[in-house]
Amino acid sequence: MTETNYATGRRKTSVARVWLSVGNGDIIINRKPVKDYFKMETLIAMVKQPLEITKALGRYNIMATVRGGGVSSQAGAVRHGLSRVLAELYPEHKQNLKKSGLLTRDPRMKERKKYGQPGARKRFQFSKR
């Protein structure tokens, strides 16, 4: 392992840059501890999921910067980036991460609004006369 390892993760319109270095398990996102940045326990668990799969919880310090999207999307982007770093670091765990769906970039995006209509799928009420 080099001094620090780096990967990029994406989800919807969020982009996360993740750095991993040997340490005591601190997770810093946008210069804040993970508990201060992601208030919900489910989002914190989402970020820690790749660490639990590779049994690396508490062994590395994670520093991430994330921009764009909402909090759930940002948590997904951090998870994706962290999974990529760990897959590079632990080739033997790559199959487990892939099986859990953590290495696949979620392609779902917001559908664009169409002209002459109120939304992406919604239509104005049809009037026969």
Image (cartoon, rainbow, N blue to C red):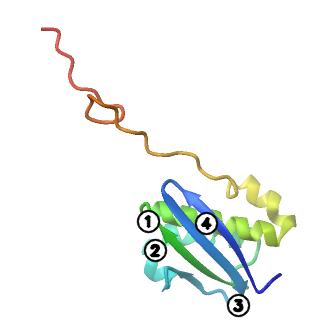
First-in-chain label (4 vs 2): 2
Looking at the rendered structure, the secondary structure element under dot 4 is helix
Q: Which mark is residue 23?
A: 3
View extreme (front): residue: 115
Other-residue count near label 3 (Cα within 10 Å), few / some / many at <14 / 14–19 / ≥20? few
Query: What residue is disc 4 on?
Result: 79
C-alpha distance separating marks 3 and 4: 19 Å
x, y percent for residue 54: 76, 70
* CA distance separating discs 2 and 3: 21 Å
Q: Nearer the viewer, residue 122 or 65?
A: 65
Q: Residue at x 56, y 63 (%)?
A: 77
**Quadrant of the frame with the N terminus:** bottom right
Pointer 1 with pointer 2, Cβ within 8 A = yes
Residue 46 seen:
no
Q: Position of residue 36 (x, y in %)?
A: 44, 82
| Residue occupying the far bottom of the picture | 24
Q: Amino acid at mark 4?
A: Arg
Which element type, helix, strand or loop, lies under badge 3? loop
Q: Give me the residue at 43% from left, 39% from top.
A: 111
Mark 2 residue type: Phe
Residue 109's spot in the image, x, y percent? 49, 46
The kind of residue tagged 3 is Gly
In the image, what residue type sits under mark 1? Val
Mark 2 or mark 3, which has the lower sequence index?
3
Judge whether 104 appears above or below 80 on screen. Answer: above
Q: Which residue is outermost to the top? A: 129
Numbered circle sitting on residue 38: 2
Q: Which residue is mark 1?
A: 71
Return the x and y of residue 4 as percentages of the image width and height. Answer: 73, 83
